[in-house]
Amino acid sequence: MRTTTYLSLLLLPALIAGCGNNRAAYKIPPAEPALVETPQNDRGMYLDLIKQMQAQGAYFASLAHIDAFRQRFGDIPELRILQADALRETGERSAAAQQYRMLTKGPQAAQAWHGLGLIAAASNDASGAQLALRNAVQIDPLNVAYLGDLGFALLQSGELDQARVPLAKAAELAPGNARAVSNLALWALLNGQPEMADAMIQRANLPQATRQEILRLASTLRRPVAITSGAGNAPAALAAQQGPTTPSLRPLPPRSMLDRFTPTTAPSQETVQ
């Protein structure tokens, strides 16, 4: 199997909740007493319950309720973006992308571009990911998740100078957000400023597991940066990451690129060749 190297692949397995590619497949969803007890005759409440299901990782179940919602209340853009997110999270990238593209001109445009960026990243399309994520940030410039995802996309392509601004914006907009701070600390390490990175890590009081993973990510991302230094060739950086052909263990991709710094118990891994 060819090693896949999209953005979320490099992200933190032990500190995440898992992403895309059937991350919620066959997962027994948590109990939903509210969904059972509440009459599904209030459109806003039902929509909120579907969002809650997705927040809990029950994406397959949310798809079923999206169909039920549509039968009862009809179709609305907010429902379609939830459906696109669920399709992406359950591995239906083509269907998700089609849905996202239809929403890039309406009130869900920022979310749609963000979803397209994640799909492009998962498909090793670095330039497409950056373009879509820039569009998301342009529409919603205060969204910390969008800024962080764009910054990491630029980091992976070795574009440290361009990554600095969105990552710094995210960290200053959400100084208490450990993931945003960790992203900026990662940038500092890659930029040859370990003292700055350590100061940020200490100030945020990040757990030891997160600190170790920041160091691991820095080591992983340095290799393609070194290979493409002076060339500015993002596709070459991705090709460099695809070099090894011997089997190895890789983390399963996370639900979101920013989720790589969310502590969990044990990493999920799969063998790749």
Image: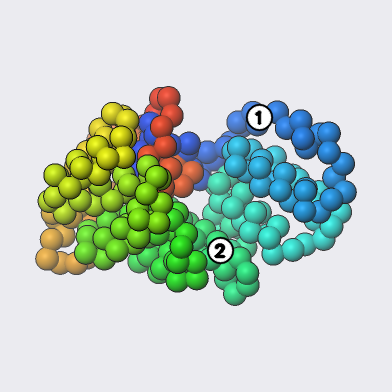
Quarter location, residue 215: top left
What colouring does the structure picture have? rainbow
Residue at the limit of the structure toward the top, as seen here: 265
Q: Position of residue 143 (x, y in %)?
A: 47, 59
Q: How many marks?
A: 2
> What residue is pinned by disc 1?
30
Q: What secondary structure is marked by label 1? A: loop
Residue 116 vs 91, above or below: the answer is: below
Give me the residue at 63% from left, 72% from top.
106
Residue at 62% from the left image edge and 63% from the top image edge:
99
Alpha-carbon distance for marks 2 and 1? 27 Å
- Residue 234 is left or right of residue 175, and the answer is left
Tell me where residue 213 appears, x and y as whole percent: 28, 36
The quadrant of the picture occupied by the N terminus is top left
x and y percent of residue 97 in the render?
A: 56, 61
Label disc, if present, on residue 112 of the rendered structure: 2
Q: Quadrant of the C terminus?
A: top left
| Residue for point 31% across, 40% down | 204
* Badge 2: residue crowd in 10 Å (few <14, some 14–19, many ≥20): many
On the question of residue 236 being in view, the answer is no
Instruction: Name the amino acid type tagged 1.
Output: Pro
First in sequence: mark 2 or mark 1? Answer: 1
- What amino acid is found at the position of numbered circle 2 in the picture? Ala
Q: Is residue 99 visible?
A: yes
Q: Nearer the viewer, residue 12 or 263?
A: 263
